[in-house]
Image (spheres, rainbow, N blue to C red):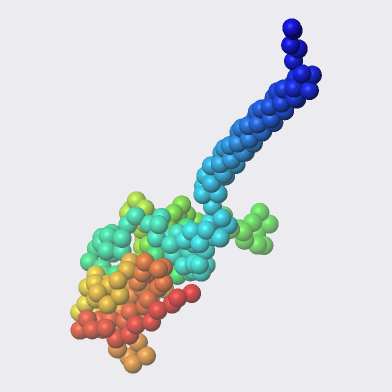
Amino acid sequence: MTCEPSPKKTGFLRTHRLRAAGAAGVLLAAALLTGCGQDSGGTSTGTATSEAARAVPERTTTPSSGASKSASPTATLTEDQKDRKTLLGATKITFDKAVTTAEGAVAGSKVMELDLRGPGESDDDTDRDESASPSASASTSPSPSGTSASPSASPSASPAATGPEWVAVVVAKDGTEHNVRVDAVSGKVIQSTEDPGQDAEEKSKLADRMAGAKQTAQQAAKAATDKKKGTVTSLDLDDNDKNVLVWSVDVVDKAWNETTVGIDAATGAVTAEETDTD
């Protein structure tokens, strides 16, 4: 007797296998989808990190406009302060060396005035003295008609300075005034001229003034810089409002402000101090 399997049981097993295969397929598909999602997420995260790494150096190495403005040291300087900074930056000869050179140009003389000037700045006193001196005046000769005269020579021009210069007024022992220009870069004398317009009375007054100055220009400058630290750019010997003979010394500090310090020419005491912050 032959026993054949029940048709219902066979259908059940086939159905069970199909369900198991389907479930396995679903699990496999889920696993594949999960793996793909993780790979996709990892790739996206890596790409974003790479982009951020490239962006950070660009932000840190590119200065902002506000930072560039605050870094400029000349942005807050006034025009006068900029001029002082430029002038002193180009000057190589200090005031004391200029004093020695100017006094050496005229035997037995002493400095009464000294001023640091930039190239192209005219010296009115020197120009006036040169125009009045015989060597600078034009000579005349008769014209062919004999009715008029024309100049045969033009006034000699003052040597031009290509850089900053010290303009000094020195006074000889007899009171004769001389104008001396010293190159503030090389230290050489550019020009030395005598004031031809002085009379005997004026010379006597200048000689007395210089004799009354017990403090030299160098001593006055030291007293001024002891009071106000900085660089001397000008000094002048004259009577103040109280008829006291004083040295007026201009000192420029590190902030490029100029302070005028009054020094008693007899005692060396400080008589006044005024700062120009423009």
At horizontal 53% and vertical 56% (from top left) the residue drawn is 68
At horizontal 30% and vertical 75% (from top left) the residue drawn is 228
At horizontal 55% and vertical 49% (from top left) the residue drawn is 59
Locate residue 22 relative to residue 220 in the image: left or right.
Answer: right
Whether residue 155 is visible, yes or no, is no
Locate residue 202 relative to residue 72 in the image: left or right.
Answer: left
Report the residue that reaches farthest toward the right. 7
* Residue 19 placement (x, y as % from top left): 72, 28
Report the residue that reaches farthest toward the front. 1
Locate residue 120 relative to residue 27 in the image: left or right.
Answer: left
Front-most of residues 65 and 27 = 27
Whether residue 161 is visible, yes or no, is yes
* Residue 189 placement (x, y as % from top left): 34, 55
Q: Name the image quarter holding residue 118.
A: bottom left
At horizontal 27% and vertical 72% (from top left) the residue drawn is 225
Front-most of residues 91 and 8 = 8
- Looking at the picture, does residue 10 appear above or below residue 275? above
Report the residue that reaches farthest toward the bottom. 242
Front-most of residues 230 and 194 = 230
Report the number of numbered marks: 0
* Quadrant, the N terminus: top right
Report the residue that reaches farthest toward the top. 1
* Residue 224 placement (x, y as % from top left): 28, 75
* Residue 101 placement (x, y as % from top left): 28, 59
- Looking at the picture, does residue 32 appear above or below residue 101? above
Locate residue 28 relative to residue 213 in the image: left or right.
Answer: right
